[in-house]
Amino acid sequence: MKKDLTCISDLAKKEIIAIVKRAFEFKAKSDCGIRHENLLNGKFVAMIFEKPSLRTKVAFELAAAYLGGIPIFLTSSQILASGGGEHGRESIPDIARNLERFVDLVLARVYSHDTIKILAKTLKKPVINALCDKHHPTQALADLMAITRHKKSLKNLKVAFIGDGNNVATSLMQICATVGINFAIASPKGYEIPIVEQTVGAEMAKKSGVSLHFLKSPKDAAKNADVIYTDTFISMGQENEKAKRLRDFKGYCVDSKLLKFAKPDAIFMHCLPAHRGEEVTNEVMDCQNSIVFDQAECRMHIAKSLLTFYL
């Protein structure tokens, strides 16, 4: 049976642990100078990108190349995946049916989760969601790897997310709930993680025996946290809302004062790109407990692990 990664709930706990463990094995080899392994044996990886990217594009393109695969990068301007029918060059199902004749796996970074669902439903080959409006599962896996790298044990850990209940927050909540990490998020009214996703997360947390807290106060969320995490307040496509969002998120910037509510050895995380002075201060971004660039590096190791897992 074909497997896809559309969101974190597609993975069982043991699969998440296995993917992260394999990523650490790839990191260890890379640290020793071993980057190239012919594990994909010439398999083709189509990369559909409707949205701009630095870390995701570089991570998966290098991962495929290092493992002996052949990445094929496709932008929306090349295939116009967004429109379809009379508004685009070709419909998403038709794009999928073409690609399955040519490639072995499709990676998609798109605006709408509906696009991911259509690709997964239509394609007989694996589909990996590299970001959409609702989920960012590959980021969450890299986040878990980064946390594991810097914390001795996941037991009794607390992750606090400060800011918009967006795709990154949703996937982070789901992976924490699945593997057994307590999770708290502080968001202004109207910017919470969607209720349907909160319900999914609550079911996962119940199975794992951990807590989820959906709060308004950043200080309450950060209290005794082992990890403080934030993301941009203005995601791609929301630029016209910038002034309103900055007003609504006033008081949610992660600064040194907020970090004092967390544990002394708490680490700071950000999926990047960071808008310094908006969701985080320079002082926090560059402090000794900031692991944002270790976190970014984990993207490539996770990319290698995912490609070998699904291929």
Image (cartoon, rainbow, N blue to C red):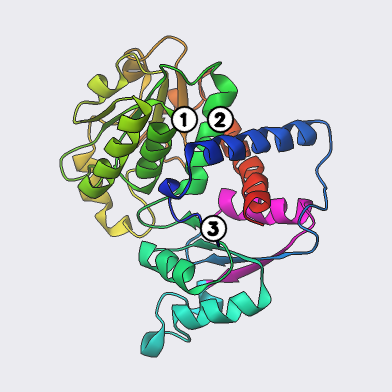
Q: Secondary structure at mark 1?
A: strand
Q: Which residue is found at the position 39% from the left and 11% from the top?
A: 263
Q: Amino acid at mark 3?
A: Lys
First along the sequence among labels 1 and 3: 3
Q: Which residues are magenta?
A: 53-75
* In-image side of 227 versus 60 (left or right): left
Q: Amino acid at mark 1?
A: Met
In the image, 148 versus 256, the foreground residue is: 148
Q: Which residue is found at the position 54% from the left and 58% from the top?
A: 3
* In-image side of 62 versus 14 (left or right): right
Q: Residues within 10 Å of mark 2 (few under 14, many from 20)?
A: many
Q: Amino acid at mark 2?
A: Ala
Q: Is residue 112 something that shows in the picture?
A: no
Q: Where residue 1 is drawn, which disc sits there?
A: none
Q: Where residue 269 is drawn, which disc sits there?
A: 1
Q: Is residue 3 above or below residue 256?
A: below
Q: Where does residue 270 sit, x and y in percent of width and height?
A: 46, 35
